[in-house]
Image (tube, grey):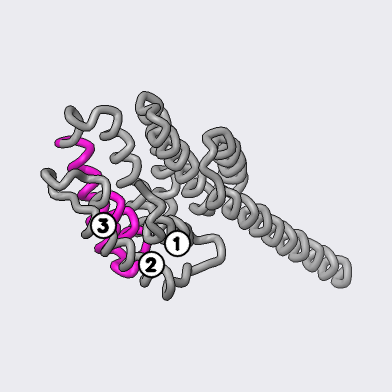
Amino acid sequence: MRKYLLSFALGCMSLVTYAQANYEKVMTEKISKLEATRSPEELQALANDFQRIAEKEKDKWQPSYYTALAYIQKGRSQMQNGNNQALEEMADQAQKFVDAAEAMEKNNSEIHLLQKMIYSLKMMVNPMERFRTFGSQAEEELKRAEQLDPSNPRVTLIKAEDVYYTPEQFGGSKTKGMELFKASLEKFNTFKPKTTLDPNWGKTEAQYFLSGAAK
């Protein structure tokens, strides 16, 4: 009887270990794809994939985080193509998963940064009308993300984007933006995520701007 119980226990442990290894493998592959694409169609497919994982892994915040990030990146891609009317839907979709991630992981700089990005998408639907509401909320979330983790390179990266693309008459500056991109890259060079599945995106974006390729 003892041998049977021991064999059963070992079998259960093996299944748990296998499931965890498979989860990490699938997540790693999806995260890599998310960092490499800006295609709205591929980003939607990845959002669907991460959502399915989140529905199975209800005790892990990262799948919901990456679902939200995929929707945000899809919105940013559409904005670059001039499709600002799609931003509201992308922001609303992302919000569901940011809320789910935050319910499991409180006071996380990465999650607050996504919240900032969601507010920015909402603002860009109509910047003149929404700056005082969503623009102010985005700024507060960025400050909160920085307070929670001043070493987070993605906070500096998003701040750099804001400064770079804001007209000088409203306080922006391409020169100051480039300085912030340099600062973010310095942070990226020393940054280490807590786990292999924690956020580690953004370095190639900083390098892109510093290469002079951005307009």
Give the number of the disc on residue 203: 1
Q: Are marks 1 and 2 in contact (CB under 8 Å)?
A: yes
Q: Residues within 10 Å of mark 3 (few under 14, many from 20)?
A: many
User: Given the image, on which type of amino acid does mark 2 rest?
Assistant: Leu
Q: Which mark is residue 1?
A: none
Which stretch appears magenta? 132-161
Query: For the residues marked 1 and 2, what is the alpha-carbon distance in whole angstroms?
Result: 6 Å
Q: Position of residue 51 (x, y in %)?
A: 56, 40
| 145 part of magenta stretch | yes
**Apparent side of residue 8 relative to residue 45 in the rendered image (left or right):** right
Mark toward the start of the polypeptide (1 vs 3): 3
Q: For the N terminus, which image quadrant?
A: bottom right
Residue ID for mark 2 = 185
Cα distance between the residues tagged 1 and 3: 15 Å
Give the overall secondary structure of the magenta segment.
Answer: helix
Amino acid marked by disc 1: Lys
Residue 121, percent from left and from top:
33, 37
Residue 167 visible at all: yes
> Which mark is first along the chain, 2 or 1?
2
Query: What residue appears at the point 49 percent right and 42 percent down from the top-left corner?
Result: 70
The residue tagged 3 is 177
Relative height, residue 90 to residue 184 (above, below): above
Q: Nearer the viewer, residue 154 or 55?
A: 154
Residue at image location 35% in from the left, 28% down from the top: 84
Q: Given this view, does label 1 or label 3 mark the residue nearer the observer?
A: 3
- Seen at 25% across and 28% down, the residue is 126
